[in-house]
Image (cartoon, rainbow, N blue to C red):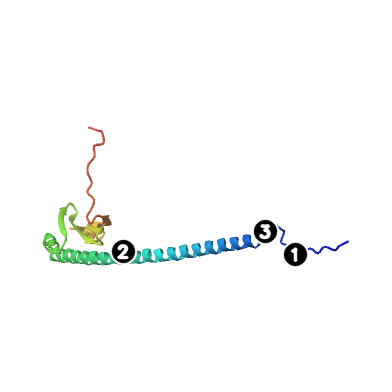
Amino acid sequence: MKNKKKGFSFGGSFGTGYASIIMVFVIITLTVLAALSISVVGSKTVLDERSFEHIAEYYDAENRANKVLMSIDEAAFEAAESGLFMTFEENAAQIEGVTVVKCPEGYTASWSEKVSEKLSLSCAVTVFSEPEQHGNRRYEVTEWDTVAGGSADTHINVWDGTF
């Protein structure tokens, strides 16, 4: 009887070619995932920078709007101190960009501040001619909203079907 020596085998059906193909596939997959990760991080950085720019533009517009509001409040204070509240309309109309309209409570002052090419901050306050009737407040903010397109939306009346 002859002794047959059996060689060491990995199961017979898998050779070194299959292991090499699987290894190449794993390396390609990991390389693609790494490239996608780098791409996502880069696009997120650009988006963050745009977001920070937008926030800075908005706060700049809000600061300008608050300065206008402060000028309107000063005009209301001066008019209340003088005893002739009608002088408020003249003083407030001299503030750049402010439109003053008489209303039952006193006057409504409105203005707009540009945030960006596509967005603006629309502001309006009602200045009371008799602050005592409104809890000693000189004014009330009635509008402080961002508006697309750089101007306030105009609402149209739609017929509701009634006569």
Q: Nearer the viewer, mark 3 or mark 2?
A: 3
Judged from the image, the secondary structure of the residue bearing numbered disc 2 is: helix
Image quarter where the C terminus lies is top left
Task: Indicate whether 45 appears above or below 122.
Answer: below
Image quarter where the N terminus lies is bottom right
- Residue positioned 76% across, 64% down in the render: 7
Please count the marks in the image. 3
Q: Quadrant of residue 11?
A: bottom right
Q: Nearer the viewer, mark 1 or mark 2?
A: 1
Judged from the image, the secondary structure of the residue bearing numbered disc 3 is: loop
Going from N to C along the chain, the mark reached first, 1 or 2, is: 1
Q: CB of mark 3 within 8 Å of CB of mark 2?
A: no
Residue corresponding to mark 2: 54
Going from N to C along the chain, the mark reached first, 3 or 2, is: 3
Instruction: Report the disc number at residue 135.
Output: none
Mark 1 surroundings: few (<14), some (14-19) or many (≥20) residues within 10 A: few
Looking at numbered disc 2 in the image, what kind of residue is underneath it? Answer: His
Mark 2 surroundings: few (<14), some (14-19) or many (≥20) residues within 10 A: some
Image location (x, y in percent) of residue 64: 23, 66
Mark 3 surroundings: few (<14), some (14-19) or many (≥20) residues within 10 A: few
- Residue positioned 24% across, 39% down in the render: 158
- Residue positioned 51% across, 64% down in the render: 31
Looking at numbered disc 3 in the image, what kind of residue is underneath it? Answer: Phe
Residue corresponding to mark 3: 14
Q: Spatial distance from mark 1 to mark 2, Cα to Cα?
A: 68 Å
Image location (x, y in percent) of residue 41: 43, 65
Residue corresponding to mark 1: 8
Q: Spatial distance from mark 3 to mark 2, Cα to Cα?
A: 59 Å
